Amino acid sequence: MSAGPARPARARWASTIGGAALALAVAGGCRGSSGRKAAAPADAGVARPTAARTGPAPSMAVTPPLPVAQPPADAESITGVPEAPTAVVKIKRLTAGSGPRPGRNDLVTINLDGWRLNGDTFLSTRTRHRPVQQSLAMLAPGFAVAVTTMQKGEKAMLWVPAAVGYNGTPVGPAEDAVYQVELIDFDAAPATPPDVAAIPPTAKRTASGLASLMVTPGTGKVRPRSYDGVTFHYTGWSSTGRIFDSSELRKRPKQSPMYREWRGIEEALTQMVVGERRRVWLPRAAPGAATSLVEEQAGLPDGTLCFELTLLEIQPGRPIPAAPADVAAPPADALATPGGVRYRVLEPGTGAVHPIDTDIVEVEYTGWAADGRPFDSTVIRGQPIKLMVSRALPGWTEGIKTMVAGQTSRLWVPEALAFKGEPGQPHGTVVFDLTLVQIVPPPPPVPASAAPPKPFGAPPPGATTP
């Protein structure tokens, strides 16, 4: 039984490889964490000291190979980190490596230990008994730049100042930190486009502001529609050339209905055929704009975003009803529930009873955001859903109680009674065309004469028990 309308998971581009950070991944492994990435704090994304910890965990204490309070006199200096050009990262190479060095966006496999300047250990891969793998683009800039100077097999100590020691704003006081890093291996990231920072004049532009150009032609003949499902690979770069998310780095394509992607990604995919790779630029909308190509969320870099998309497969879908003309606001004659849901009866029903909280109801629906973009519909699944009235969205609970079986109503549900600003969900007022198919009859009562089932292992009639 469903708990209400499906809560669509729109694309959250900065959360997939960037939402859980190296420090959190390591600490989570040390503490037996489930490894879920969604709970990472905003400043996670770098091996860094945790402000809340005042001393090392006994199982994680590691003796550094060199004193950590100051780098040795022969340590090399690394400067010119774009995020803080005056900061100086120190590196002391302990064991030589060989071969190429990783790039700024590459996926590295590393062992590491981390210390505060007082010698307290705040992370170590030793307790995990395995290295960690993470894109350098997601790590603190000072840490990442130092690792790009290393070769496979090399081991080094890094002194990273607080100014370049965090990927984002730290939750607590910023601290300098010292690391011992062993670069085990790395996988090359997709090459950064040469025109990532500026849209070239050869790019095709649309009325929405989307700019794109074909990188590799495809072999398909059909372009996906907004209600189709698609399987595609993507990589996204900031205007400075840093990757902020990539299915290609994870080696796992994304599968999603088109209408649940960002508006700009959806529009770009509708221009493509299977096998095609396309580079797209998504400019930011002006504050307060009615529509945007980008769904703003925490962790996204500033400025125009550049993606490369490769369309792998199209899964044909069912057409979703077009948005109603009054999707943006309820008409003056719309009725209102006590909680503030506005509604209008589109088709009267044939029933005579209104559902109550404990009823199970069967419903069909389609939902649109206030800008007319669909986000969910039973049309997609080809069948209604069943739910308990009290366990639906609060706005649904109120709306359903005004209905009878067979009735179709249009509901304007304010954000507080809908998705409450949840990331990845439609914001603001949402609109549903909702049909109450039936109030599901309760199961028939068990006859009083029916003998209760014997418990497992019950003694036979006439047997004595101790």
Image (cartoon, grey):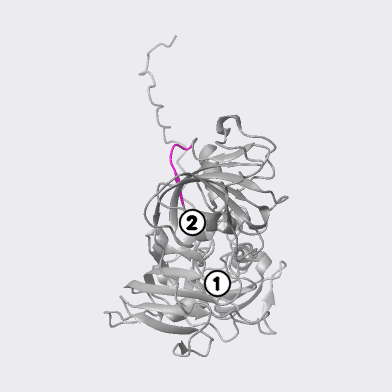
- Residue depth check, mark 1 versus mark 2: number of the one nearer the observer: 2
Q: Main secondary structure of the magenta part?
A: loop
**Circle 1/circle 2 CB separation < 8 Å:** no
Check residue 240 in the rendering and tell me which mark sits there, or answer none: 1
Amino acid marked by disc 1: Thr
Q: Which of the 4 image quadrants contains residue 56?
A: top right
How far apart are labels 1 and 2 at the CA level? 20 Å
Q: Is residue 294 magenta?
A: no
Residue drawn at (46%, 79%) of the image: 280
Question: How many C-alpha atoms fall within 10 Å of the one at disc 2: few (<14), some, or many (≥20)?
Answer: some
Question: Range of the magenta residues?
Answer: 128-133
Residue drawn at (60%, 76%) of the image: 303
Q: Who is closer to the viewer here, 419 or 334?
A: 419
Determine the secondary structure under disc 1.
Answer: loop
Residue 268, horizontal then vertical, whole percent: 44, 80
Above or below residue 268? Residue 402 is: above
Residue 362, horizontal then vertical, whole percent: 48, 63
Q: Which of the 4 image quadrants contains residue 139?
A: bottom right
